[in-house]
Image (cartoon, rainbow, N blue to C red):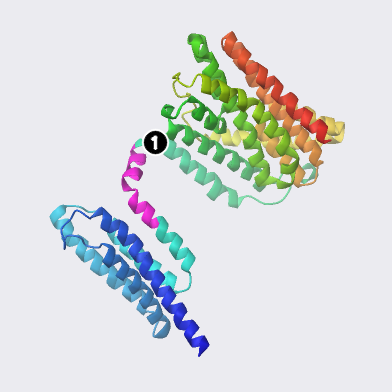
Amino acid sequence: MPFAITGQMQTAFHLTVALLLGALIGLQRGWEARDKQAGERIAGLRTHALVGLTGGIATLLAQAVTLWLLPTMLLVVAGLAISAYYARSVVTHDYSITGIIGLLLTFSFGALATAGEVVPAAMAAVITTMILDNKQEIHGALKKLQAYELDAALKLLVISVVVLPLLPRQGFGPGQALNPYEIWWMVVLIASISFVGYFAVRIAGPKKGILFTSLFAGLSSSTALTLHFARISRNQNQLSSLLAAGILLACGTMLPRILLYCLIISPSLLSMLVLPLLVMTLVLYLPALLIGYRDRSANISQPELSKNPLDLKSALILGGLLVIILLLAEWLQVWLGDAGIYLLAAVSGLTDVDAITLSLTRLNVAETIDPSVAVTGIVIAASVNNLFKAGLAVAIGKHGLGRKVAVPMVLSPIAGLLCIWLMA
């Protein structure tokens, strides 16, 4: 008897969830049609709640009688919805099928919840409700989306969802250092972070302020922002302080980005790398925030970042660079030992810190190099990269901007290397 009671209570719980999930979607649909007269609304709160409950009861009947009852009931609900929406479209000339899809999903969520998958059903119902409720925002975002941005998103899906699973997951070459799957996965990781950074700047726009924009521009291209601000300072010298703050924020963002790479690829390095990189970040962020607060009323145009959030050609070049660095790391370590790794890190940091960071974390995972060597190499590459950008600011920008950028940029690597020395 206790088992029968428990089973009945569980069934009642599942049906209640089915009813509530339908009511959740119906609440949104009813709110949208709240100004219509009674009888003009095809499906509001009550209808969706009952459809969710119908899905739950159909699942119980399918389990007790025949499995064909569930698809049959779904077809009945679909037929009723299509008939009602067709009749309304004749009068209103509104041919949207969103309402029909919403009813079918409501039925499906009720069936899923009664089948025992309560959490997936609830998650899907909440997401569906959010999509339905943000119609204007979604349509507005589509109108603002540029063709090249949509193309970039599709390319990101191609290299991550289509290409990545097809690559072999085994090592090739000297020391089995080249793993096509892992190399391409790191390319996808960098591309994804740059993609997020681009759209953070794109969505926020200049209204959020130059410091906010610079912060997220560091995820996309701190070098591009440095060049852009340095050029602006030549014509608007009075804004040199705020421009310098933007450059420091963008360059500082590169360092937490490195920590993110390590967290994803080689978490064991994180404990050794977090202190020096956070100290380096603070040395760049603190003067930037102080300058930004002092000159917060100044206005600067949004940084002119690349108009291609994801250039597939650049992704392929990065993959080739990763291969070269992995091979050089293998050979230089045999030839020069740890000094060869440090030399490679310094040279690579002149052009790109991502490739050497991912290469060293990959070699650490493969236990090819010691963790302390990987950490030191990453800090050296980041230091050289930021010093290179400081050199660009000094060479291209006005004297005031160069001085404000150069001092923190020089102190930052010193602080990072000092942390490593003290830890050692």
Residue at far left of view:
91
Residue 297, x across and y down, in percent: 45, 20
The overriding secondary structure of the stretch rendered in magenta is helix
**How packed is label 1: few (under 14 Cα within 10 Å), some, or many (20 or more)?**
few
113 over 273 or under it: above or below = below
- Seen in the image, is 299 located left or right of residue 411? left
Look at 50% across and 10% down and name the residue there.
Answer: 238
Q: Give the residue drawn at x 36%, y 40%.
A: 141
Instruction: Name the foreground residue: 301 vs 344.
Output: 301
Amino acid residing under circle 1 = Ala
Give x and y (percent) for residue 282.
Answer: 65, 29
Can you give x and y, in whole percent of width and height, for residue 315 in the image?
A: 58, 36
Residue occupied by mark 1: 147
Using the image, determine if residue 50 lies above or below residue 385: below
What segment is highlighted magenta in the picture? 128-143
Q: Nearer the viewer, residue 394 or 90?
A: 394
